[in-house]
Image (cartoon, coloured by chain):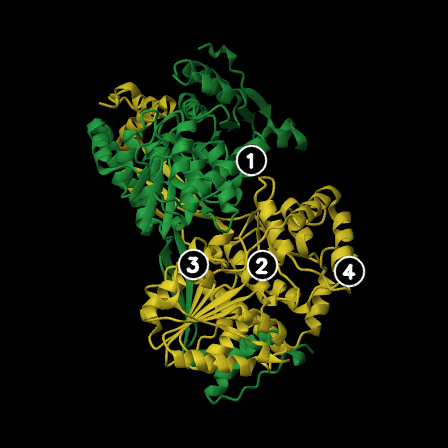
Chain colours: A green, B yellow
């Protein structure tokens, strides 16, 4: 691999005008082109009409495999398990345990309060009944994604947890993905990939249960299919919109350039459109990271992918770490690494990011696998308004209220006045009829007299 | 009003086949017709290109008002306040206080845990920086919606809270809406309605700040505009998809038919497409509620709307209260009222609903105004996968991890094994380079040797 091709953009934030700043933080355009849109529409329609038969046809066409049973059977799980190295099985268990620890510790709790005497108001939690998990197996299968989705689904208590992952040409799913699915207690696994997997989980077929919400990353077809089913009331909700993976690193003069370069490369190897940004207040650090990136990249098996991603990456000189935080908030990265002397001091200023990694000993890859946090995170600037997947993503929060007669006496008049102001007389009467039944004088004026 | 027109459908669940059951719980089709879609696309484009000038033109066309300033000024707030009856002002404060009490009590809390020695993993909370609230003023202005959106936005600490509500023909917003906005600390209010308000908040104009997420109910134009901006990465996220409002009541033989009828009517008066369903295991109760609905409806100023809604409503005889719970879960109502002897006993079985009202003294209208729970809730079956608006809707949950050298020693090998299994060598090296720097033997096998 000739890594001399790597040209990393160097910029100085202070010297950029507004247009250049926007350009410096621009992500690759996400064109929802018509070909993709129509192609996915056709696949969805085929699955809705043709069910399992259509799934078999589509798998033959796109995954080049002949599916016998669409669902993975117990014997296949056993066979998969038998092929795995003990160290890998142990690592899957270890990761699952830590993901469970963190997700349990941060799971929503039921809560309630009396907002007035006799007025009890609560929030209760209920699992989303049927959830569908998608685990890609494009350049490589991702057992870690099965853990990141399966563990919180189990903690939430979802009654039916379905997982789809594309089969190889031999008609089998990746052994590690199957093992991870079993470890997390997924109920059913289907050998399905692409838009057809999403369609099957959104609408259901004879084999695949229809789901209320779909989760997980995927290629452009999967992403487009998730968008389409989520805008159809008959379809399914989705975890979040998706774009290419990305990292932003803030490093100061004391950062280890070997570590910084390794973190940039671990993002860059994801795909040619991965986004990699380094901000530093030190020219020397930027220089040494650039050299280290060149050196380390040459040794990578996926160097070709990394080089493409790096050609669009940016090393940006900032005037101060405070400015770095401002730039980061503006970009709203999926992954944010703070390799600075006092990362907690910067953390206070961070407004928007998917997941943050503090200090020299916290490479982003620990979050991808086994620190315990979730790796399904908002990309493409969606970290401004979305959060990563958590137990809450698999739950609904339902509010509950119960008034005693005393409670209605306490808040009924307020309700009646506001209902009258909104000219919703039946809303008002639902209160005043009850107060009358309690024998209370109902002194609430009718709507027309509410405004002086 | 001739309420003899009211014909309420009576059904017996046990006698329905699957198709009839589906039909019995069907909601009115939500057709995203092309005219609406294209009309909204044009408005959004006009606002993106024409900014404030386009907003003035569109307001003249659709709201029939000539806007001087688009933003509501301090003098207008003062004038609005002066016109309000003291009782209404007091009710707005009272409602805001209880909404605040409940929303604070159920707000997410930061959390953290050590998932291994030296591995600290946390979830921190950050407000969504810029949020846009929409308060309709169609058949009547809705100050309560300003409270339901403004209070949680303030608790979350959003830095810029913008509110749009359509102006009347005289160019002014409703006085109660303005007062409620001021009480909740909304930063800027704009006299804008419809798709143009959504476009302005999603993309920004000279006057209106662009927002990261938009909230609130609205008519078909507002709903379509929210859908369109939320599927554009340059646009804004939204709270949830929307459909007509709805209630499902489960009542047993001991329920008070006067109260049940009043609750059904308070839903029916919302709009002709409001959904009203009553489930009971008692024929006598169904009979008496039907009579009460006829009687009470005649007295309502909005009887005409209610009659239309009731003509599509259903009174369903169920075999048992357990069956009622099953039917309710299948329907997933926005509002669920349990007027039964022991409502808490049924609550355990409830899987999907927006907000639940327990017992005889808890009319749904208290939740619309001032029990403290939020009235912006999932409709149209979205309660299967979505929750109502809460403080969490205005926040992002950001995960944070910090490893000490000891922490990396503890979980680095697990990370390296999983990265190798996924053929992500740079991910593996981001760990092994660091372990090597610590002087540790790095005994993690390369990817090719991971599978036995």
User: Do tag 1 and tag 3 residues touch (Cβ < 8 Å)?
Assistant: no
Please state the chain letter of the residue tagged with numbered disc 3 in the rendered image. Answer: B
User: Do tag 1 and tag 2 residues touch (Cβ < 8 Å)?
Assistant: no
Is A369 positioned to the left or the right of B307 in the image? left
Q: Which residue is mark 4?
A: B64
- Could you say which is closer to the camera, residue A298 or residue B5? B5
Quadrant in the rendering for residue A259: top left
Please state the chain letter of the residue tagged with numbered disc 2 in the rendered image. Answer: B
Measured Cα–Cα span from mark 1 to mark 3:
31 Å
Q: Residues within 10 Å of mark 2 (few under 14, many from 20)?
A: many
Please state the chain letter of the residue tagged with numbered disc 4 in the rendered image. Answer: B
- Work out whether disc 1 and disc 2 sit on a shared chain: no
Mark sitting earlier along the chain (3/2): 3
Q: Position of residue A250 (x, y in %)?
A: 48, 31
Q: Is residue A349 visible?
A: no
At x 41%, y 16%, the residue is A296
Q: Is residue A295 above or below residue B384?
A: above
Question: What quarter of the picture does the N terminus of chain A occupy?
Answer: top left
Q: Secondary structure at mark 4?
A: loop
Q: Is residue B440 above or below residue B363?
A: above
Q: Which residue is mark 2?
A: B217
Q: Which residue is mark 3?
A: B19
Q: Which residue is mark 1?
A: A38
Q: Residues within 10 Å of mark 4 (few under 14, many from 20)?
A: some
């Amino acid at each position: 691999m000739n890594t001399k091709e790597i040209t990393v953009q160097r910029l100085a934030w202070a010297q950029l005008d507004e247009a250049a700043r926007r350009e410096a933080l621009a992500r690759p355009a996400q064109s929802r082109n018509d070909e993709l849109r129509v192609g996915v529409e056709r696949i969805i329609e085929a699955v809705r009409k043709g069910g399992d038969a259509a799934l078999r046809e589509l798998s033959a066409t796109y995954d080049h495999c002949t599916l016998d049973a669409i669902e993975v059977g117990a014997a296949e799980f056993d066979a998969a398990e038998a092929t795995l190295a003990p160290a890998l099985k142990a690592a899957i268990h270890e990761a699952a345990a830590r993901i469970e620890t963190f997700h349990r510790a941060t799971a929503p709790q039921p809560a309630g309060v009396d907002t007035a005497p006799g007025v009890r108001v609560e929030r209760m939690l209920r699992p989303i009944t049927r959830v569908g998990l998608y685990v890609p197996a494009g350049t490589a299968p991702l057992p870690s994604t099965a853990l990141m989705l399966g563990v919180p689904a189990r903690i939430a208590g979802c009654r039916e947890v379905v997982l789809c992952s594309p089969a190889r040409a031999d008609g089998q799913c990746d052994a590690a993905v199957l093992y991870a699915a079993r470890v997390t207690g997924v109920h059913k696994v289907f050998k399905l990939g692409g838009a057809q997997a999403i369609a099957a989980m959104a609408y259901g077929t004879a084999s695949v249960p229809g789901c209320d919400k779909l989760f997980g990353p995927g290629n452009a077809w999967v992403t487009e299919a998730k968008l389409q089913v989520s805008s159809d009331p008959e379809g399914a909700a989705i975890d979040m919109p998706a774009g290419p993976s990305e990292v932003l690193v803030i490093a100061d003069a004391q950062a280890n350039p070997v570590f910084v370069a390794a973190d940039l490369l671990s993002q860059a190897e994801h795909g040619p459109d991965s986004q990699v940004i380094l901000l530093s207040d030190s020219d020397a650090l930027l220089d040494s990271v650039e050299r280290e990136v060149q050196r380390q990249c040459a040794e990578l098996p996926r160097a070709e992918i990394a080089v493409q991603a790096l050609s669009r990456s940016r090393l940006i000189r900032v005037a101060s770490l405070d400015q770095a935080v401002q730039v980061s908030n503006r970009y709203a990265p999926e992954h944010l690494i703070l390799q600075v002397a006092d990362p907690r001091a910067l953390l206070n200023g961070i407004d928007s990011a998917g997941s943050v990694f503090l200090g020299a000993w916290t490479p982003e890859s620990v979050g991808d696998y086994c620190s315990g946090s979730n790796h399904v995170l908002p990309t493409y600037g969606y970290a401004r308004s979305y959060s990563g997947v958590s137990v809450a993503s698999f739950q609904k929060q339902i509010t509950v209220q119960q008034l005693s007669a005393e409670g209605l006496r306490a808040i009924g008049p307020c309700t009646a006045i506001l209902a009258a102001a909104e000219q919703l007389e039946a809303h008002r009467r639902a209160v005043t009829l009850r107060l009358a039944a309690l024998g209370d004088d109902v002194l609430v004026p009718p709507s027309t007299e509410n405004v002086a």
